[in-house]
């Protein structure tokens, strides 16, 4: 792509959690958007367009929020790519600003799940997986069991992902959970899908996250004090699967990674830290391997050895990730980019990654029987 430079110049979030019905999607989106604008030193008058990611927000959710923050009448687009919705909204904003269409835009991811979801998240009722009762948790349980069989990984090594991410979240004021869990807690939690238990699974969450994205002209006009440059925001979708594929092949992750690395002119070894879509403990492991950030079959062992912890060689999910920060599906991709921005501008407090210069965020959104959904890999660098 021949795009002009594009920068993130502000970020804001509502704390992720479970909220009563009177805390609405519109209220959370408004809170995050206003926080991002304040952080960027911008007002509603500066914003030329709005890009919104959500899954369960209903018709024109973005417009319902935009009217609350003084942006009625601006171009507002809504994006649904399941868990990749917020990241997809960022991609569209990145392209529009890089192409010179706008100088300052607002990107928002928002979701109110607790009013709509009972039990685990399920496939669409029209999908074959739903017809046979194949829930997302069951697929990841199969992934974990296959990984243990193929590579000799232990249940304790997989559980170490949850222990690490909960430890990281204690320094994140926006996280749904801000307490540590022990290995014993994870191993003896309520069973969900063998071998995974409750603490191996991301929670049902409500929340919103937003970033302000600007061209060099927009950055100068707002005199932004902090910025991080978007080097890549690559979107790919799953291919048609035939036969009995390897459940841990992660072809979609590999292709999403290659696309982002090419756009950003970097390789896996250039990444300093990662915000990973850890909807389940095993997902963090196999997706890191799919992105070629860890050797295949070694991710579980390296996690238990501290390789992906803060202070390790490749910190993963310093925010606490989906497992502990929470997973309001439409907001997750935007929240990951908030964390990249805070880390790269030295604003992450007690979870700060030392000498962070290049960060990668990865979202994998949903699935359809016979294929994967949409995956977005974003690379940000210090400006």
Image: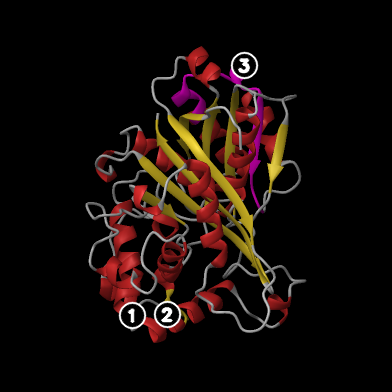
Circle 1 is placed at which residue position? 153
- C-alpha gap between disc 2 and disc 3: 52 Å
What number of labels is visible? 3
- The residue closer to the viewer here, 121 or 382, is 382
Side (left or right) of 133 relative to 308: right
Give the percent coordinates (x, y) of residue 134. 63, 79
N-term-proximal mark, 2 vs 3: 3
The outermost residue toward the bottom is 149
Q: Are marks 3 and 1 in contact (CB under 8 Å)?
A: no
For numbered disc 1, what is the local secondary structure? loop
Please tell me whether mark 2 or mark 3 is closer to you in this view.
2
Place residue 375 in its image quadrant. Answer: bottom right
Q: Is residue 240 above or below residue 174?
A: below
- Whether residue 42 is visible here, answered yes or no, is no
Indicate the quadrant where residue 380 lies. Answer: top left
Circles 2 and 1 in contact, beta carbons < 8 Å: yes
Region of the chain picked out in magenta, as a range: 36-55
Q: How is the image coloured?
A: secondary structure
Q: Is residue 52 magenta?
A: yes
Q: Is residue 132 magenta?
A: no
Labelled disc at residue 45: 3
x 40%, y 86%: residue: 149
Q: Nearer the observer, disc 3 or disc 1? A: 1
> How far apart, in angstroms, are the residues tagged by discs 3 and 1?
54 Å
């Amino acid at each position: 792509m021949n795009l002009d430079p594009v920068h993130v110049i502000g970020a804001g979030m509502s704390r992720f959690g479970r909220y009563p019905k009177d805390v609405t999607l519109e209220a959370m989106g408004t809170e995050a958007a206003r926080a991002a604008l304040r952080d960027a030193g911008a007002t509603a008058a500066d914003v030329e367009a709005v890009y919104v990611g959500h899954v369960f927000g209903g018709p024109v959710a973005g417009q319902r929020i935009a009217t609350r923050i003084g942006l009625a009448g601006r171009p507002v687009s809504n994006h649904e790519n399941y868990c990749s919705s917020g990241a997809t909204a960022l991609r569209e904003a990145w392209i529009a600003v890089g192409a010179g269409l706008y100088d300052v835009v607002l990107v928002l991811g928002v979701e109110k799940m607790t009013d709509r979801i009972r039990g685990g998240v399920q496939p669409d009722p029209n999908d074959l997986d739903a017809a046979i009762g194949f829930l997302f948790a069951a697929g990841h349980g199969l992934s974990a069991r296959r990984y243990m069989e193929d590579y000799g990984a232990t249940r304790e090594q997989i559980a170490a992902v949850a222990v690490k991410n909960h430890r990281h979240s204690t320094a994140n004021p926006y996280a749904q959970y801000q307490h540590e869990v022990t290995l014993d807690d994870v191993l003896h939690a309520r069973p969900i899908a063998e071998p995974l238990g409750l603490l191996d699974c991301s929670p049902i969450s409500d929340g919103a996250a937003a970033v302000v994205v600007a061209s060099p002209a927009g950055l100068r006009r707002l005199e932004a004090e902090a910025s991080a440059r978007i080097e890549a925001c690559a979107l790919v979708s799953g291919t048609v699967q035939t036969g009995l594929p390897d459940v841990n092949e992660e072809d979609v992750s590999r292709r999403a990674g290659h696309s982002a690395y090419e756009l950003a002119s970097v390789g896996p070894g250039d990444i300093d830290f990662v915000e990973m879509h850890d909807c389940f403990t095993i997902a963090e492991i196999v997706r890191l391997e799919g992105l070629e950030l860890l050797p295949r079959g070694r991710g579980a062992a390296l996690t238990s050895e501290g390789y992906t912890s803060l202070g390790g060689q490749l910190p993963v999910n310093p925010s606490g990730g989906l497992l502990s920060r929470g997973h309001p599906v439409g907001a997750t991709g935007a929240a990951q980019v908030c964390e990249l921005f805070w880390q790269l501008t030295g604003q992450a407090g007690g979870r700060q990654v030392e000498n962070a210069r290049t960060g990668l965020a990865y979202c994998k959104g949903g699935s359809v029987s016979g294929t994967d959904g949409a995956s977005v890999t974003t690379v940000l660098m210090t400006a």
